Image: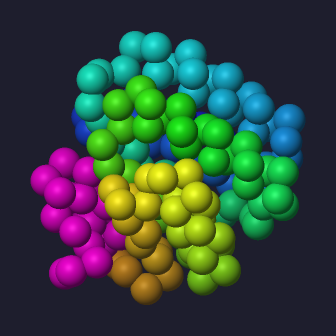
Amino acid sequence: MYTIERTDFGYQITFAGKMDEEELHEWIDDSQATLQDSPDEFGVLVDMRDLKLLNDDEQQLMRDGQQHYQDAGMVRSSVILDSAILTLQFRRLAKESGIYDWERYLNAGTTDDWHQQAVDWLVDEIDPDYQ
C-alpha cells in the first residue's frame, strides 16, 4: 500500500506492507502524474515504518521512482523507518540512485520527534544527523 500527499514542504509518501512489482509500477505512474504539477524545488517525507523488505527487482523499481522525484525538483528528503535492516537497505538504495547526499534517515523507534526533525531537514536544512 502507498499514498502520495501534497504538503507545504512538497510531498509525503507512505509505504506499508509488502509492495510487489505491480504496486511499485502503480506508484511510479501515480508519482509521474503527481509530479507534473510540482513546484521547481520541493522536499519529500517518506514514511516507511510499516514497509516490508523489498527483493532485488522491487528495489530497482524503488530506485527508478526515487529518480523521478529527483528529476522533478526534489532538493531534500527525509525517510522514516522503524527497522535497522530496512534502514540499511534504503541507505544503500539512496547511494546507488545518487540521492544519498540530500536524504536523511530517522528511526521512529528511537527518535520521539522524528516528524519534526524530518520537516526541519526538508524546510530549513537542519541536519538530524548532527543534532
Tell whether 27 sits left or right of 10. right
Tell whether 57 sits left or right of 73. right
The one of 98 and 108 positioned closer to us in this rendering:
98
Q: Residue at x 49, y 81 (%)?
A: 109
Q: Position of residue 1 (x, y in %)?
A: 72, 44
Examine the rendering and report whether any part of residue 17 can be seen: no
Q: Residue at x 66, y 80 (%)?
A: 85
Q: Position of residue 130 (x, y in %)?
A: 21, 80
Q: Residue at x 30, y 35 (%)?
A: 42
The one of 122 and 113 positioned closer to us in this rendering:
122
Examine the rendering and report whether any part of residue 46 can be seen: yes
Could you tell me what secondary structure mostly forms the magenta stretch? helix
Residue 121 magenta-highlighted: yes
What stretch of residues is rendered in magenta? 113-131
Q: Quadrant of residue 71?
A: top left
Tell whether 75 sits left or right of 93. left
Q: Position of residue 66 (x, y in %)?
A: 55, 43
The correct choice, above or below, for 9 with respect to 109 in the image is above
